[in-house]
Image: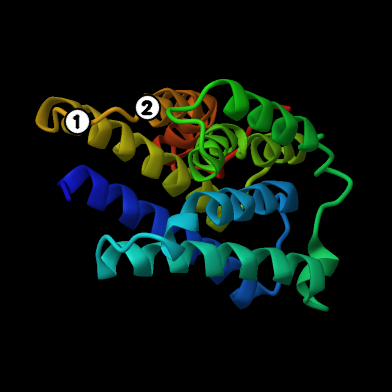
Amino acid sequence: MNIFRFLGDMTHLISILILLLKIYATKSCSGISLKTQELYALVFLTRYLDLFTDFISVYNTVMKLVFIASSLAIVWCMRNHPLVRRSYDKQLDTFRHYFLLLASFLLALLLHEKFAFQEVLWAFSMYLEAVAILPQLVLLQRSGNVDNLTGQYVFFLGAYRAFYIFNWIYRYFIDPHFTRWIACVSGLVQTALYADFFYYYFISWKNNAKLQLPA
């Protein structure tokens, strides 16, 4: 494992911890898109099927289980927790995410590295993760003001993918057998979607002001 992969994993983990902190400490999921969280849960469930077939390392296995368990816990809280679900912004979270599901699945059937059940689902998870943040970004734009924890959550989530791009570049030059082009392209698309958010996040940080996104 290289430093970029490790930093990517850690920023991803930090983003999840921040979101869990927001939900459990404030008993609120205001500003959080349930649709994005459901998409991420599906991403991890379809990507980490290799837990049943391959063992890479204890670290790898633990991280995969943490991502699956935490994503399912977040979805459960937003849907079923008696206090948390009251704060869900259903009127703002109206992005038609099933189009993302359909497009990702069709793309995985057409573009994959190997036509096998697990490989097609892996490709599906990569394509879906690239666009899973869209409902969240749309919700934030509609709400305008972004609270500190939600802003930190989205920032670290974007940083995680940015570090993974450096990880893939590093592996391309170091590992002659590295062929995960789907991951590279999907990661670039996903990071590009964060560009607007990163810009306003930096402006708010520079001016020590509350993060606001234009509607």
Q: Secondary structure at mark 2?
A: helix
* Residue 20 screen position, x and y as percent: 56, 68
Task: Calculate the distance from the C-alpha at mark 2 to the C-alpha at mark 1.
Answer: 15 Å
Q: Relative to residue 20, is residue 106 drawn left or right?
A: right
- The structure residue drawn at horizontal position 51% and vertical position 31%, both measured from the top left corner, is 115
The quadrant where residue 212 appears: top right
Q: Is residue 197 above or below residue 73?
A: above
Give the residue at mark 1. Answer: 177
Residue at the image position 23 percent from the left and 31 percent from the top: 178
- Which residue matches tag 2? 184
Q: Please provide percent x and percent y for residue 145.
A: 67, 43
Quadrant in the rendering for residue 21: bottom right
Residue at image position (31%, 47%) is 8
How packed mark 1 is, by other alpha carbons closer than 10 Å (few <14, some 14-19, many 20 or more), is few
Q: How busy is the neighbourhood of tag 2: few (under 14 within 10 Å), some, or many (20 plus)?
A: some
| Quarter of the view holding residue 125 | top right
Secondary element type, mark 1: loop
Give the vertical position of 4 relative to 107 (above or below). below
User: What is the quadrant of the C terminus in the image?
Assistant: top right
N-term-proximal mark, 2 vs 1: 1
Q: Which is nearer the eye, 25 or 41?
A: 41
Instruction: Give the answer, above or below, for where 157 lies relative to 80.
Output: above
| Residue 112 visible, this orientation | yes
**Res 28 seen here:** no
